[in-house]
Amino acid sequence: MQLSEDQEKALSSLLAWYKDPGRGRFITLGGYAGTGKGWMGTHNYFNWVE
């Protein structure tokens, strides 16, 4: 799957948050319906826990 420029930015932000040992417990991801928020969240969750 080809990510858009905005999705690439969001993914970079999510990865930076995930790798930060001092991060907060939660991060929010906002955007219009159909822009891939759910896919990005579930896709990355399952990749991180494996």
Image (tube, rainbow, N blue to C red):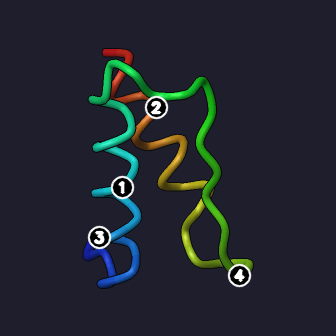
Would you call the spot at circle 2 few (<14 residues within 10 Å), some (14-19), or many (20 or more)?
few
User: Reading the chain from its start, which is encountered first: label 3 or label 4?
Assistant: 3
User: Reading the chain from its start, which is encountered first: label 3 or label 1?
Assistant: 3
**Label 4: element kind:** loop
Picture quarter containing residue 36? Answer: bottom right
| Residues at marks 2 and 4, CA–CA distance in whole angstroms | 21 Å
Residue under label 2: 45
Residue at 61%, 58% (x, y): give it: 29
User: Reading the chain from its start, which is encountered first: label 2 or label 1?
Assistant: 1
Question: Which amino acid does the dot numbered 4 rest on?
Answer: Tyr
Would you call the spot at circle 1 few (<14 residues within 10 Å), some (14-19), or many (20 or more)?
few
* Circle 2/circle 1 CB separation < 8 Å: no
Query: Left of 43 or right of it: where is 34?
Result: right
Residue 4's place in the image compared with 41, above or below, is below
Q: Position of residue 39 (x, y in %)?
A: 53, 55
| Residues at marks 1 and 4, CA–CA distance in whole angstroms | 18 Å
**Label 2: element kind:** helix
Q: Which numbered circle lies on residue 32?
A: 4
| Residues at marks 2 and 1, CA–CA distance in whole angstroms | 14 Å
Question: Which amino acid does the dot numbered 3 rest on?
Answer: Glu
Q: Which numbered circle lies on residue 13?
A: 1
User: Reading the chain from its start, which is encountered first: label 2 or label 4?
Assistant: 4
Q: Which numbered circle lies on residue 28?
A: none
**Label 1: element kind:** helix
Residue at 45%, 28% (x, y): give it: 23
Query: Left of 45 or right of it: where is 29?
Result: right
Q: Comparing marks 1 and 4, which lies closer to the viewer?
A: 1
Residue under label 3: 8
Residue at 66%, 67% (x, y): give it: 30
